[in-house]
Amino acid sequence: MARIYIPYGSVEGQTAQIAEYISELIRAHGHQTETADLKRSGHTLPGGFDGVIVAASVHMGKHEGYVTDFVKKNRGELERLPSALISVSLAAHGEGEEAESYVAKFGEETGWHPAHVGMFGGALLYTHYNFLKRQIMRKITRDKGSPALDTSRDYVYTEWDGVQRFTEDFLAGLAAPSR
């Protein structure tokens, strides 16, 4: 049985939901997990874990600074342990090139280049935004050519089957003999 740490940064809650879903999947496979909201838990990677999955959302073209700080501070441990990055953005719902550029930029900023990277669509949560943010997000959405313009509802783009496959692939990597 492995112990997996899942630190995350989430602004509007979709990345937190993804982190919790991954935690549930890992527990269903007989392992132990601990999720941690990096906004509240600090920047130290606790000991005693066999793997780490860092999850971060992208806003305004960047991952949260506190997630970047966590990775910089713990890069040595992240490179020693089996680890993965999950990047959550609206761009991951589209063609993927923009989402890939966010991950590449994160790697440049932190020096961490994990073998396992998952890019998943986030959510456009109009009903959670204040008036100004709702209008800004609608304009950005319209400018990108998306039909998701009805601000009376939310749009969730996370492909949960993909999150499940990613998690199972990560767990399979833990079980594989080291070479």
Image: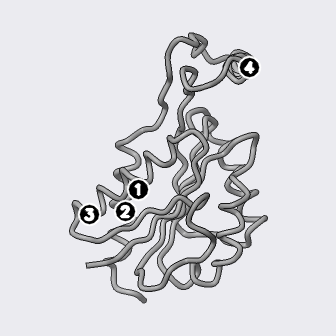
- Label 4 or label 1, whichever lies nearer to me, is 4
Of the 4 image quadrants, the one containing the N terminus is: bottom left
Q: Which mark is residue 166?
A: 1
> In front here: 45 or 92?
45
Camera-side residue of 35 and 101: 35
Q: CA distance from mark 4 to mark 1?
A: 36 Å
Please tell me which of labels 2 and 3 falls first in the chain. Answer: 3
Whether 78 is drawn above or below 13: the answer is: below
The CA distance from mark 3 to mark 1 is: 15 Å
Mark in the foreground, 2 or 3:
3
Amino acid carrying mark 1 in the image: Phe
Residue 27, numbered label: 3
Disc 2 marks which residue? 169
- Closer to us: mark 3 or mark 1? 3
Q: CA distance from mark 2 to mark 3?
A: 15 Å
Q: Name the residue at 63% across, 78% down.
A: 74
Residue visible at 48% across and 65% down in the picture: 53
Kind of residue at badge 2: Asp
The C terminus: image quadrant? bottom left
Looking at numbered disc 3 in the image, what kind of residue is underneath it? Arg
Is mark 4 in CB contact (under 8 Å) with mark 3?
Answer: no
Q: Is residue 10 above or below residue 53?
A: above
Instruction: Give left or right: position of 26 versus 136.
Output: left
Mark identifier at residue 132: 4
Q: Using the rendered view, name the quadrant where residue 34 is placed.
A: bottom left
For label 2, the SS is: helix
Mark 4 Cα-neighbour bin, 10 Å: few <14, some 14–19, many ≥20: few
